[in-house]
Image (cartoon, helix red, strand yellow):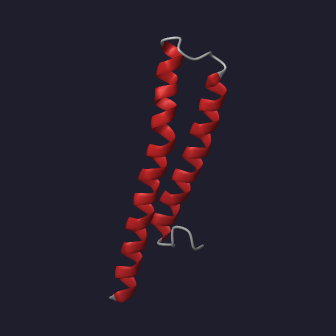
Amino acid sequence: MQAVLGRVLRALQNLAAAVLTAAFCFVPAWYAHIAITVQLAPVWVYGAVAGLVLVGAGVTLSFLEKAWNGRKPLGE
């Protein structure tokens, strides 16, 4: 029973980490896209936005994989 509870707790920690990572990466990317659309920022900023989205997606997917497998968020 304790092993199952530990696995569920680790999965919840990973899900929280995935949501926070997505928020920290995708929200600024969205606002940068809006700034480019209304011409407050130059078009070359899309390169930085693409990098931010790719890194954020990779880390978010990593946390989701760890949640699926029941591993620790930062331990393994």
**What x and y, as percent, mark residue 17?**
45, 58
Q: Is residue 48 left or right of residue 8?
A: right
Residue lying furthest bottom in this view?
1
**Could you tell me residue 11's position as x and y percent?**
41, 68
Q: Furthest-top residue in view?
A: 39
Q: Quadrant of the N terminus?
A: bottom left
Give the side of residue 62 with respect to residue 12, left or right: right
Q: Position of residue 47 (x, y in %)?
A: 66, 27
Q: Quadrant of residue 51?
A: top right
Q: Is residue 26 above or below residue 40?
A: below
Residue at image position (50%, 14%) is 37
Residue at 45% across / 63% down in the picture?
14
Say which quadrant the C terminus sits in.
bottom right
Residue farthest along the front direction in this orientation: 40
- Circle count: 0
Q: Residue at x 53, y 52 (%)?
A: 61
The answer to whether residue 40 is left or right of residue 19 is: right
Front in this rendered view, residue 28 or 57: 28
Vertical position of residue 11 compared to residue 35: above or below? below
Residue at position x 62%, y 24% in the image: 46
For the residue pair 51 and 58, the one nearer the viewer reads as 51
Q: Is residue 10 above or below residue 39?
A: below
Q: Position of residue 21 (x, y in %)?
A: 49, 50
